[in-house]
Image: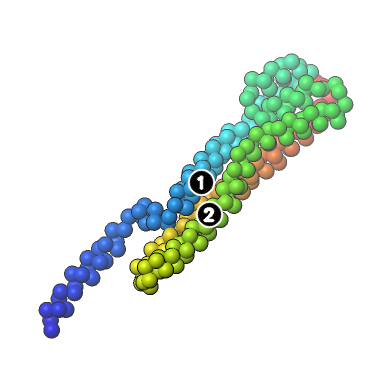
C-alpha cells in the first residue's frame, strides 16, 4: 500500500513546478486575437501620455525673472525691448504677452481680446492628441468585452463540434474570455487616468495663465517710470 502513495508524490511536485514556471507573456497571448489590438492601444496610450506630459511640462514653465524684466521694460516705456524679449523666449506665456504688448495704445478690450485668443491657441496646442487618448479609454474595455463574447462562443462551438463537455474545452474558452477582459480593462484604466491627469495639468496652467494676464493688465495701469 505504501508504493502507490510514494509514486504519487513526484507527480504533485512536478505539477506545482509547472504551475510556478508559467510564462506570463504566453498566458497573455492565450487571450485570442483581441489581445493584439489591445497591446497596440496600450503602446499608443503610453506614448501619448509621456509625449503630452513632457510637452506640457516644458511649455508651462514660467520664468519669473523674465516676467520681472518684461514688467520693468513696460514701465519704462521701452516696448521694443519688451517685444524682443518675448520673441527670444520660446514659451506660450511669452507669445501671449507679446500679443498684448504689440497692442499697447489701443483700448484695453482689444488688448485683452488679443491675449485671450492667443491663450486659447496655446491651450489647444497642449490638448493635441488628447482626443485619441480619450478614445482609447473608451474603446479598450469594449474590445475586451468582445474578447469575452468570443471566448464564450468558442466554448459552445467546441462542445457542439466535438460533442464533449470537458474541463479542458471550457478552460480554453475561459482563458480567452478572462484574459481579454482583464487586458481591456487595464488598458482602459491607464488611458483614462492619463487623460484626466493631463487635463489637470492643462487646467493648472490655464489658472497660472489667467493670473499672469491679469498682472500684465494691471501693469498697464501703473504710471510710467
The x, y position of residue 59, in whole percent, is 61, 33
Q: Residue at x 39, y 56 (%)?
A: 30
Vertical order, 77 against 133 (above or below):
above
Res 117 quadrant in image: top right
Which residue was labeled with disc 1?
41
Q: Dot 1 lies on which element?
A: helix
User: Depth-wise, is mark 2 or mark 1 nearer the camera?
Assistant: 2
Q: Residue furthest right?
A: 107
Density class for disc 2 (Cα within 10 Å; few <14, some 14-19, many ≥20) is many
> Image point 62% across, 37% down: which residue?
128
On the image, which quarter does residue 68 sit in?
Answer: top right
Q: Callout 1: few (<14), some (14-19), or many (20+) C-alpha neighbours within 10 Å? A: many
Give the residue drawn at x 67%, y 20%.
87
Q: Is residue 194 visible?
A: yes
Q: Nearer the viewer, residue 72 or 216?
A: 216
Q: Quadrant of the C terminus?
A: top right
Task: Report the residue at 68% width, 36% height from top.
Answer: 123
Mark sitting earlier along the chain (2/1): 1
Asked whether disc 2 touches disc 1, contact meaning CB atoms under 8 Å apart, the reply is yes
Please determine whether, in this image, residue 25 is positioned above or below residue 56: below
The count of marks equals 2
Secondary structure at badge 2 equals helix
Residue 149 higher or lower than 197, as above or below:
below
Q: Is residue 215 visible?
A: no
Q: Position of residue 61 (x, y in %)?
A: 61, 33
Q: Which residue is mark 2?
A: 143
Amino acid at each position: 500500500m505504501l508504493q502507490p502513495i510514494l509514486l504519487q508524490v513526484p507527480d504533485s511536485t512536478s505539477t506545482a513546478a509547472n504551475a510556478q514556471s508559467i510564462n506570463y507573456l504566453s498566458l497573455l497571448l492565450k487571450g485570442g486575437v483581441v489581445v493584439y489590438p489591445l497591446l497596440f492601444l496600450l503602446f499608443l496610450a503610453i506614448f501619448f501620455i509621456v509625449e503630452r506630459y513632457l510637452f506640457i511640462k516644458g511649455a508651462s514653465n514660467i520664468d519669473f525673472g523674465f516676467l520681472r524684466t518684461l514688467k520693468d521694460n513696460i514701465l519704462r516705456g521701452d516696448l521694443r525691448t519688451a517685444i524682443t524679449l518675448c520673441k527670444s523666449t520660446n514659451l506660450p506665456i511669452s507669445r501671449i504677452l507679446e500679443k498684448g504688448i504689440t497692442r499697447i495704445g489701443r483700448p484695453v478690450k482689444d488688448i485683452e481680446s488679443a491675449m485671450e485668443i492667443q491663450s486659447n491657441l496655446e491651450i489647444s496646442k497642449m490638448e493635441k492628441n488628447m482626443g485619441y487618448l480619450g478614445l482609447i479609454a473608451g474603446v479598450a474595455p469594449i474590445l475586451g468585452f468582445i474578447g469575452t463574447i468570443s471566448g464564450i462562443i468558442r466554448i459552445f462551438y467546441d462542445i457542439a463540434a466535438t460533442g464533449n463537455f470537458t474541463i479542458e474545452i471550457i478552460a480554453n474558452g475561459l482563458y480567452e474570455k478572462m484574459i481579454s477582459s482583464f487586458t481591456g480593462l487595464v488598458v482602459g484604466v491607464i488611458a483614462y487616468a492619463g487623460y484626466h491627469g493631463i487635463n489637470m495639468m492643462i487646467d493648472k496652467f490655464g489658472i497660472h495663465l489667467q493670473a499672469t494676464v491679469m498682472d500684465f493688465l494691471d501693469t498697464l495701469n501703473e504710471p510710467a517710470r
